[in-house]
Each structure stands twice: as C-alpha cells, then as structure tokens.
Image (cartoon, grey):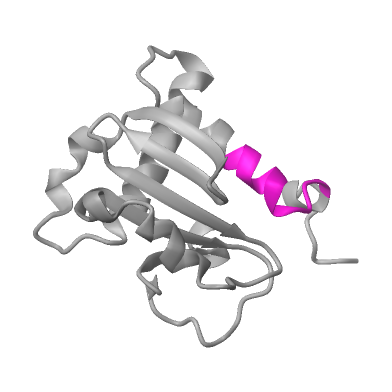
Amino acid sequence: MSEELTNNLFNYATSELSQDAFLCWLLSYAQEKKYSGDDAKLKKCAQSLIKVFLLGQKSIFEKDLIEEDLIVKKIEKQWKYIDVLVTLESDKKIIIEDKTYTTDHDNQLERYKDEFTNEADNVYGVYYKTGFCCETIINDMYKGYYFFNLERIR
C-alpha cells in the first residue's frame, strides 16, 4: 500500500497557480471581518500563518511588535510577476514566491523586493517551497526570504 495520502490537496492541485489560489483563499480570512464557527477558525489559521511569515524574519526583540499587523487589507495574485502579494492594515507587505517543483531563476527574488525599495523596512519575503527541495537551502533565510517548506507546513 502506498504511503501517499489520497486526500492530499496537491494530488489534485498540481501547479503552483493552484497553490497560489489556496494561499489567497486562506489569507483572505484574515481580512477585517467578523466570523463565527468554522470561519472564525479559518481566520485564526490565516492570522497564525501571517504571524509565522512575519516572525521568520524578526529578531527576538521585535516578535511582540506584530500583534497589530495581522489584518489583511489587500491580496494580489501575479502582481508584477509576484505570485502573491499581501498588504496588511499596517502597510507591511508580504511577497510570497511560491515554488513547487522548480527553483528561483533570473534574480526574481531580488527583483521582487526591488519593487519596494522605498518601503524596504516594511517588506517581507517568503519563499514558499513545496515539492522537490534543493539540499543547499538549509537555513531559515534564502536570499533574504523566509524559507517556508513542507516541514514547516506540517
């Protein structure tokens, strides 16, 4: 019997665009809305994910400063080739570069951050990597992006 889960989302959504759509859907629950029941749980999950994305790039002294930063103002897909761009109420931006079975190329990670040179202190990069992972990436940071892989998803 195969070890592979039959109800694994990525058996059905096999491209990074499907994964982008899922991330946008989940993060949309962190918008300023009142939710109840399961929707309230999804909001908490979305805000927890945002917190993880922000904490991955903060020093220990800054970690308590992000509580107010968990409300999403805007979510954009494929904005200037950025897979997902999340703007928070605090005007912090989270660039999510989503990779499944490929790696970054053509200095794309640097170029995406360069779009926000005037806002550099408020821009956070997340290298969201599922599928094949090159063994040279062993740190939490990769080219200035928080490295978020399957190990962190579990």
Q: The C terminus appears in which quarter of the rendering? A: bottom right
Could you say which is closer to the camera, residue 42 or residue 13?
Answer: 13
Question: Does 65 lie within the magenta span?
Answer: no
In the rendered structure, which segment of residues is drawn in magenta?
12-23
Q: Residue at x 82, y 46 (%)?
A: 12
Q: Position of residue 138 (x, y in %)?
A: 45, 82
Magenta segment's dominant SS is helix
Q: Is residue 147 visible?
A: no
Of all residues, the one furthest to the right in this rendering is 1
Vertical comparison of 140 with 12: above or below:
below
Task: From the viewer's perspective, tell me whether residue 121 is left or right of residue 61.
Answer: right
Q: Position of residue 89 (x, y in %)?
A: 27, 29
Of all residues, the one furthest to the bottom in this rendering is 136
Q: Position of residue 95 (x, y in %)?
A: 43, 51
Q: The N terminus appears in which quarter of the rendering? A: bottom right
Count of marks placed on residues: 0
Vertical comparison of 120 with 46: above or below:
below
Q: Residue at x 38, y 14 (%)?
A: 33
Instruction: Write down the quadrant of residue 78 in the picture.
Output: top right
Q: Position of residue 61 (x, y in %)?
A: 9, 59
Q: Is residue 74 visible?
A: yes
Task: From the viewer's perspective, tell me whether residue 144 is left or right of residue 12.
Answer: left
Task: From the viewer's perspective, tell me whether residue 68 is left or right of residue 113.
Answer: left
Of all residues, the one furthest to the left in this rendering is 61
Q: Residue at x 71, y 68 (%)?
A: 101
Q: Residue at x 80, y 62 (%)?
A: 4
